[in-house]
Amino acid sequence: MSKSEQPDDDGYHISDPSEFASNMAKVAEQTAKIFSAFAAPADSDKAQQTRAEELGNVAKTLGDIAQDYVSNPEQFFNAQMQLWRQHTDLWQNTWKRVLGEEVDPVIEPERGDKRFRDKDWEENQVFDFLKQSYLITAKWAQDTVEGAEDVDAHTRKKANFYVEQIANALSPSNFVLTNPTVLRETMSSNAENLVKGLENLADDMESSGGELRISQTDLSAFEVGKNIAVTPGKVVYQGELFQLLQYEPTTEKVYKRPLLIIPPWINKYYILDLNEQKSFIRWTVAQGYTVFVVSWVNPDEALAAKSFADYMTGGILEAVSAVTKATGEKNINAIGYCIGGTLLSSTLGYMAAKGDKRINSATLFTTQVDFENAGDLKIFVDEEQLETLDRKMAEKGYLEGKSMASTFNFLRSNDLIWSYVVNNYLLGKEPFPFDLLFWNSDSTRMPAATHSFYLRECYLNNSLSKGDMVLDGVKIDLSKSKVPIYNLAAREDHIAPLPSAFLVGKFLGGETRLVVAGSGHIAGVVNPPSMGKYQYWLNEKGADTVEEWLDGAEEHAGSWWPDWDKWLAERSGKKVAARIPGDGELPIIEDAPGSYVKNRA
């Protein structure tokens, strides 16, 4: 047979059948061991009860949607017909392709869907059929939830989330025989990828105590204080809830008014100090600010009773006192990030009621004070789910860090779960070293009392914006605070959505400068000027709604950091000689990043 007559090699051929058979035997043996480990009843009775309650909540939610259709037979019939018609169109198109006709797809993946990047998802008729059949069914399931008429908005939102998770899990990209990339790799490597993948799976189970926590990055590639969180500084104060870091100056002169950064306690502060290129802290120091950062404790059962109010009095207010003592200044500027911004806003209302004027200005990163239109986390907040969570936290007195990490991962499950299942377990590859994902895996615990209060009073009752929240005996009225605000929202934020963060200026009484950054909750904030990425929007005239604001906004290329620097410099006083950590009234305790941040959950 001449070369031109030989069939094309499509890549779906076993290169060595004997080696393939040997590896498949190893796969079968290892799979049996892993299933046995999964089946072992390692959980406590309470943990199993909690899991059963969580699954029961899913079943009840989806059952409410099903009952709505049972009560409306015509609506149910129309939904079935819609699915049948689209699949009929797909079959017809597939046969036309077999016969050599050019046809347009019935459905295509959404822009940015990374699951179907392999060329064979489009060029190979079998894989194209699998892809389109899956997309039709997944969209139909979502449309069915949306079409339920007699269910409340919260139930519909929960059902949408659960259906999305089921659909994401059942994607053909997640299985060996229906993913062209994995199938080719399996055949060309004689299933060596599956052997290695099961080893990775076993390692992940062993490292997480028998439960599965998927590796998203090479954890051995980073060490806090060595190649991450390395901006030079000192710990100058230590309390029960936090260490206070003061950074060494890099300019001869600094602004008179110091700056205190309050990160969220559901993550570690060094998201703002990943490396020299990305570090917001390092860049801010270089602009001539005396920078202090709160490094929250990773709490255990001893701190179970610590409340949201304790994080205010024993956290922010204690840190403010420490900063003024270290610098000799009577007032400071402050930054709050995410829930740290919510706590800072609450503290501003508390300080206004007390006549405390030690905070001169506040910058809020992706912060919510009104939770009516809060992000995807609101899916998990209703009385039934909170009661289950309270019982779960009561076992140890805190919420495990992995629980919150899993929740955030499920909000973007295709990117943060299933892509790693494919890479690590099906392709048998090691995850790539990535500082952001190392930080994401370095989760923190949360005291039961604090977390329960936050979810109930903010997400469930929306007490802060209503003026009903009480902290340390004081009813919080945000409008009484006249502190000027720099409100940074992110346009693609799914944790603190733009329409929600937009409302900060409506409730706080001070003059507010709204800036909308490109990208999301993390990348919208951590966007140094040197990288030249994304953009930000300004609307100097303001607007009553976020839609009107965006319509009248001017887009600026690159980072918002210089705009913030200009705003803050005007509120930071004259320049004085640079302050060295330990020169003030607070002695040095240890080098930054300190010991609290190194305590892994």
Image: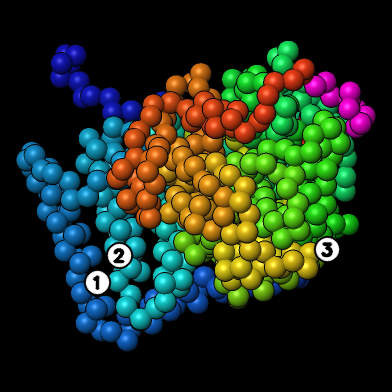
Q: Quadrant of residue 320?
A: top right
**Mark 2 residue type:** Asp
- Residue at disc 3, secondary structure: loop
Other-residue count near label 3 (Cα within 10 Å), few / some / many at <14 / 14–19 / ≥20: some
Q: Residue at x 42, y 58 (%)?
A: 164
Q: Earlier in the sequence, mark 1 or mark 3?
A: 1
Query: Which sits in the foreground, 79 or 386?
Result: 386
Under circle 1, the secondary element is: helix
Whether tag 1 and tag 3 are in contact, CB under 8 A, the answer is no
Q: Which kind of residue does numbered mark 3 sit on?
A: Ala
Disc 1 marks a residue whose amino acid type is: Ala
Mark 2 and mark 3 lie on one chain; the one further toward the N terminus is 2
Magenta stretch mostly in which secondary structure?
loop
Is there any visible trace of residue 172 in the rendered image?
no
Which residue position is annotated with label 2? 143
Looking at the rendered image, the disc whose residue lies closer to the viewer, 1 or 2, is 2
Location of the N terminus by quadrant is: top left
Q: Can residue 280 be seen in the rendering of this structure?
A: yes
Q: Residues within 10 Å of mark 1 (few under 14, many from 20)?
A: some
Relative depth, front residue between 382 and 245: 245
Residue behind mark 3: 305
Q: Up-down: is 455 above or below 71?
A: above
Asked whether residue 267 is drawn in magenta, I would say no
Q: Which residues are magenta?
A: 579-592
